[in-house]
Amino acid sequence: MAELHRPHTGPPAPPAGFVAALRTAVRGGTDFGPTARALTTMDASNYRRVPLGVLAPRDADDIAAALTVCQEYGVPVVPRGGGTSIAGQATGTGLVLDLTRHLNAILDVDPAARTATVQPGVVLDDLRAAAAPYGLTFGPDPSTHSRCTLGGMIGNNSCGAHSVAWGTTADNVRALEVVRYGGEALRLEQGSPRQGGERGPHGVRELIGAHLALLRTGYPDLPRRISGYALDALLPEHPGGPDPVRAFCGSEGTLAVVTEATVRLVETPRARALAVLGYADEAAAAEAAPGLLPYGPLTVEGMAADLVREPAGLPRGAAWLFVETGGATPAEARAHAERVLRSADAVDGTVVTDPAGQRALWRIREDAAGTATRMPDGSEAWPGWEDCAVPPARLGPYLRDFRALLTQHALRGTPYGHFGEGCIHVRIDFDLLTPPGIARFRRFSEELADLVVAHGGSLSGEHGDGQARAELLPRMYGDELVALFGAFKDLWDPDGGLNPGILARPAPLDTNLRFEVLPKRPVDVAFGYPQDGGDFAGAVRRCVGVAKCRTAEAPSGGAGVMCPSFRVTGDEEHSTRGRARLLHEMLAGEVITDGWRSTEVRDALDLCLSCKGCRSDCPVGVDMATYKAEFLHHHYRGRIRPAAHYALGRLPQWLRLAAPFARPLNALARVRPLAALAKRLAGIAPERTIPVLATETYSRWLRGHQGEGPGEGEGEGKVTRVLSPDRVVHLWADTFTEYLTPQVGRAAVRVLEEATGRTVLPPPAGVCCGLTYVSTGQLDAARRVMRRTLDRFAPLPGHPVAVLEPSCAATLRTDLPELLPDDPRAAELAARVRTLAQYLEEYAPDWTPPRLDRPVVGQTHCHQHAVLGDAAERRLRERLGLTGELSGGCCGLAGNFGFEKGHWEVSVACAEEQLLPAVRESEPGTELLADGFSCRTQLDRLGPPAGRRARHLAEVIAEGLEGGDGERPARR
């Protein structure tokens, strides 16, 4: 194992006087510190460039002022939106303009004209939501629609799944307000001469006029030709006259900075249906796609089986086409889809009209940009040839040749994409870590460029050229036309200050690779990282930057959690991606230079709730909760920790010591001055209430319930009668159930006895999953606790362990084997963990639970969602007659997080996102469900009105068994 890498020299500093001049000229915030620089070194590509600093301009005047100062000091500028570009064009070495912070307003929606005017930082989904009440939408819809910005879409000429029907971004932009390097503002409109001419700056008209023949013959004719500058849009014979707006779209921030855009809106079909067609292979699907275009589909998307981890209701086949149709009514949309199905020569097919079913299928496709970054065997795959396009009629032969080229270079990839327009996305398992691998990456790129050109295609069909492909543009366009691109760039930006190294006069495609700076050997870590070969750098590399964590709202219905802290603050450093970037730079040691002792990383991780939402919701399975625990373990090694780590991180031992004195301690906690002093000493937020200790622990109650004596100490009693191994239940006595909410354990015993007829075994003394030690990064202590638990807790062979607390179940399932990878008992115990619902479904399948028949509201625990899944809980609630969906997102308490001083506001804001509004809006008599102790505690503090208490599902079932609201059924 290696120590963290340390470079000898850091990145260059800003020119003398530049920072002061910039701050004097602008009103927006500037940040030249290591955190801001580290957060913007990368986009979603293979490339990394370290900027000097970041400016969040407040308005167009700020942008103009900044570009004036930058020109004066010779500082390059890169405009940045959501940072989801895949070719490297959202990275730069100068000043990054963060256009998402302030320039994110929708200025106007004109339903009569079917246009909207927006600032460049507007997120696409926000524009779509603003247009939806008028039955309108913005047509281009890349898979990053929940976080990509309109400015970025204009820069890349983004397309998306529906370009078959509505075209690219360039087809849907009517006018642009832009600012050139140096501060000059221009307005570009279709067919209207303004400020310097309809074609942009002075000299553009003459440049076009001098090269008419080249421009008329040099461009391939295909729908997804995104590569290079669209100078053919400035030809005099262009429909509607020369179109400077179209010529500007796709310029990747190299010509000017967009400050405002007027875009076209299109009518949204009132109903949609989805025909899913199965084919023998992807080439067969590709060859079938052009034949479906005459039926007027909204989309014709394709993917192969090697991208799909689970069939998810797909019809038979090894590749599929998703053909979406629209209509004025559901019946009309379905009829169109069924016509497509009848006309398609498919192996199998189905028509899906249910919106939820359609969303589930589209989610597979939209997450492909992330899931494709891992091969089925877990090895890494990368962009670089993410979106080349060929004429649709050539797609089948091209895919066969493409697969052959992969084989020739011993590479693997998983193609998918917009088959109806001949555009293919693919991630390839390039070795970008070693010189031989990088050399092969270059050879393959050159040969694939030639293959694309041979099929009449474009090197980029959606995401732009950036650094990934611009070097190869001469192979597509020839040297003369590429030289004309350079001349066009010079007219717009004679100083070369805007996004240098991108598109015009590009940097070589095998330089600035983001992995070059990482340690060459694995660093010493505590967790096993089994999915990453034990390499922490490999785990951090998982984040490819697609930024699904940067969504403004959590999905409803318990469908998503990631990333609650970003949704509260809106700051990149509080997103999963932002934290992964900081860890990457910590490993690199160039911008963040103090390794595990980094205060920048510590501060960014401070607001990570360790909810584990990213473990399931991130398309590539980034597990920031684990990374945070790892970091805290190293950061505080040999140092004094925050008080909350001692108070809350070691909670099990404090509660065990306090249990015999529960009554007097509870009385003291009600004395406000004493409680305030205790919270201050323990590092607990003053707004929090100290939990009440149970006067009778769960273990003591269980022994009495089974007729046993109290024993010599907590948990030491034993069942004196001899029980057959198949007549017992191992119910995990977690710390929260044992000492704080034993009523949950009592209810679970009641339910398990009724459902299975088995006896619940008393827990051994001193067992603990180690959750609180893990969440505070006390990993040495966590391992000691876990080993002691494995020594004392030995469930009968083949027997599962029912765990009531979701966070403890998740710790046993994941953290236990990952912290003790060399102890086979850890993996064995992890495999046996079940939730209560999972246990009942598996071991009492014929039991008929009581019918409760009432609505529910509440929250699926974050760890349950991320690690365990809630399918069994959903099925059990349905059998109980508990109707309604539980909330997504996070309750905000999240174990120790919400109790720690300084986290109160964020904790409450997380709860206010979905959980608390859902509880307030629920009708009287609605059951409040929350299986997690944290969720119940948060609701008790913030949520239900007087007389309503959030309960564990076990409590609700037990009440029904006692005849509270349902009839008690007999066990079958």
Image (cartoon, grey):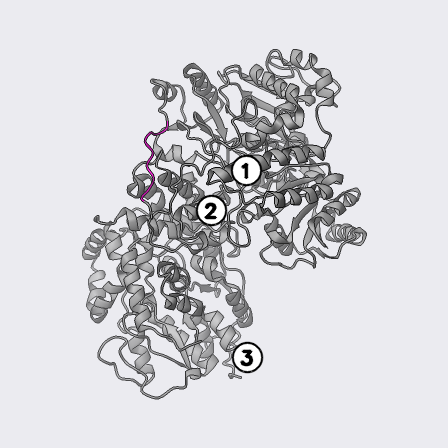
User: In the image, what residue occupies the spot 32% across and 64% down?
Assistant: 786
Residue 71 is tagged as none
The range drawn in magenta is 3-11
Please name which of the two marks, 3 or 2, marks the residue nearer to the observer.
2
Label 3 or label 2, whichever comes before in sequence order: 2
- Is the magenta region chiefly helix, strand or loop? loop
Three-letter residue code for mark 2: Arg
Is residue 5 magenta-colored? Answer: yes
Q: Position of residue 254 (x, y in %)?
A: 54, 23
Three-letter residue code for mark 1: Phe
Q: Position of residue 537 (x, y in %)?
A: 40, 45
The answer to whether 866 appears left or right of 521 in the picture is right
Q: Look at mark 1 in the image and give the residue it sits on.
A: 441
- Residue 845 found in image quarter: bottom right
Three-letter residue code for mark 3: Asp
- Residue 829 found in image quarter: bottom left
Q: Look at mark 3 in the image and give the residue it sits on.
A: 846
Q: Secondary structure at mark 2?
A: loop
From what the image shows, is residue 645 above or below residue 712?
Answer: above
From what the image shows, is residue 611 above or below residue 52?
Answer: below
